[in-house]
Amino acid sequence: MRATGSTRSAAGRTLVVVVACVAGVVLSLLGATAVLAVTGVALGSGSSGSAPREARAVVTPSPTRAAGTSVVAAPTSAPTPAPTASAVVPAPVATRAPAATPKVAPAPAPTRRVAGALVPVVGVTDGDTIKVRVGASTERVRVIGLDAPELKGDECWAQKASSKMQSLVQSRSVRLVADPTQDDRDRYGRLLRHVVTEDGRLAAQVLIEGGFAKEYTYRNAYEHRGDYLAAQKRAQARKVGVWSAACSAPVVAPAVPGTTTKPSSCVIKGNISSSGEKIFHVPGGGSYDDTVITASKGERWFCTEDEARAAGWRKARN
């Protein structure tokens, strides 16, 4: 009986060794991870009635260790990647192109107020009178606002004044502008008009500015009178044309038959009409040769036009 027990005891030890070896082989083959995972599940369910707990450690085989060994790694959680500038792409915003700045054309040069159609000039009488074609007829036009030297009396600068007017309007077209302050026609039937060249210049102002004529006001002030007076002052300051030294010397005119004695240097006739109006006539004027000075009636001679105007006389329209 004792022998039999010893035999059994030896057989049991042998079986334990064999089991242990088999277990070692199994551990080597399956790896520690599978075994410990099973063990973790078993441990998690070890307490009756308690919820299974999450395994806190995961055993993974180390590639640098021999088979059958394991490394317990600390639990980690994957970090949430931080957003980068390239990760968020803003939606394109529609923008309106700035409107192009419009080019501002330069303001046009001021032009003079004119009326009526252009009419052709067919003749120049002198520095202040021209002839134009209106329809089928020819009209004489006395330019408002100036008095040019007379060609008939061979007055100083008369030929130059006539030539200047020709250079402005002869064989060209002009606009005739009536002035509400003046009559439509003068006593000789001439139209009274402002004469405007095709390029917008006032013929009277051009002649006065150049010293070819003097400013002249008949009864009422007219449009542009201020401009003409300013032009005359500039011509006087420059001493050009009728304001030059050549025209400042007194002119001696031949005696007119039937007139009273006159000073040799004063040739302007101060006549008094039948209606009592005082009118002075300059050499070359239409009525100059026919005018007789009668001292007993208060008529007289004047040396300058300014002197005659200052005395209350007005210049004859012809």
Image (cartoon, helix red, strand yellow):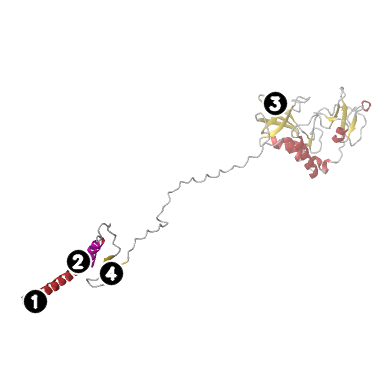
Q: Is residue 220 left or right of residue 6?
A: right
Local SS, label 2: helix
Between the C-alphas of marks 4 and 2, the distance is 15 Å
Q: Main secondary structure of the magenta part?
A: helix
Of the image marks 1 and 3, the number of the one nearer the N terminus: 1
Residue 216 location (% of width, % of height):
79, 33
Q: Which quarter of the rendering shows the C terminus?
A: top right
Which span is picked out in magenta?
30-43
Q: Which residue is mark 2?
A: 30
Visible in this render: residue 163? no
Looking at numbered disc 2 in the image, what kind of residue is underneath it? Leu
Q: Which residue is mark 3?
A: 138
Residue drawn 8% across and 75% down? Answer: 5
Residue drawn 19% across and 69% down? Answer: 27
Q: Is residue 197 magenta?
A: no
Q: Which residue is mark 4?
A: 71
Local SS, label 1: helix
Between the C-alphas of marks 3 and 4, the distance is 130 Å
Looking at numbered disc 4 in the image, what kind of residue is underneath it? Val
Contact check, label 3 and label 2, Cβ < 8 Å? no
